[in-house]
Amino acid sequence: GIQVEQSPPDLILQEGANSTLRCNFSDSVNNLQWFHQNPWGQLINLFYIPSGTKQNGRLSATTVATERYSLLYISSSQTTDSGVYFCAVRLSGAGSYQLTFGKGTKLSVIP
Amino acid sequence: DADVTQTPRNRITKTGKRIMLECSQTKGHDRMYWYRQDPGLGLRLIYYSFDVKDINKGEISDGYSVSRQAQAKFSLSLESAIPNQTALYFCATSDYRPGGSTYNEQFFGPGTRLTVL
């Protein structure tokens, strides 16, 4: 099956710092999503980005499908950004319906 | 109001008991999914359904069954719960219609934290 690797596994930031999270995947995909799992366990949709670049406030994401990676940028981090960030992909082609998740990047933003 | 709701939000049960987790959605999506998350890991697919007559096994379906009662409702059952089914369970939905603004994007419920003693 498709492999999804996220880096770094853990990240500690001072409030106000910027960061880049990376997601590498091993095969062609037609869906890539970034999620934030907050400390209460809820999964929040950040981006649906199978290709290209999107921005939403302090967050932005870029997916280069031909090179099989995606980046999530967090600028001016806040303590509320803490949690685990997941990348999830869906394999291209008929018969593939599930999202395959990476193991996540655990972000801790300290005051 | 939340678009995807799950009940209960937390449940503690004993080995051997039958448990049902319920999911409802108001997004009008045809596709629904059940995932489980174990500590320190991403989510894995248990079952998925494209409509009330279409149920499919996912990566880890053993020990689970599902029922699609209506377009908006999808239930997950553990017929005889065991401790290694202790996990966080998520329901998700997606829209199958190409060209729609949310086509192919999955939306998740708040999760059910299940503990099997």
Image: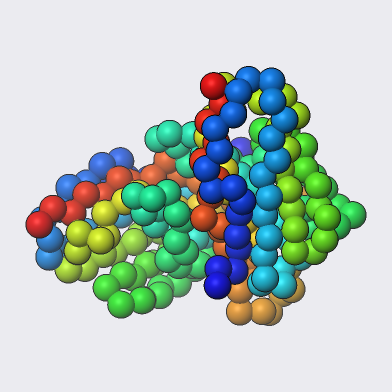
Is residue A110 placed above or below B86 in the rendered structure?
below
Q: Residue at x 77, y 43 (%)?
A: B66
Q: Position of residue B50 (x, y in %)?
A: 79, 58
Q: Residue at x 73, y 38 (%)?
A: B77
Q: Position of residue B61 (x, y in %)?
A: 71, 34
Q: Residue at x 55, y 38 (%)?
A: B11
Is residue A79 placed above or below B75 in the rendered structure?
below
Q: Residue B1 is drawn in which quadrant?
A: bottom right
> Which quarter of the figure is the C terminus of chain A placed in?
bottom left
> Which quarter of the figure is the N terminus of chain A placed in?
top right
Q: Residue at x 27, y 73 (%)?
A: A58
In this view of the protein, which residue sits in the foreground, A62 or B22?
A: B22
Q: Residue B89 is drawn in which quadrant?
A: top right
The reply to whether residue A26 is in sight is no
In this view of the protein, which residue sits in the foreground, B104 or A91?
A: B104
The reply to whether residue B19 is in sight is yes
Q: Position of residue A73 (x, y in %)?
A: 29, 64
Left of B40 or right of it: where is B15? right
In this view of the protein, which residue sits in the foreground, A60 or B83?
A: B83
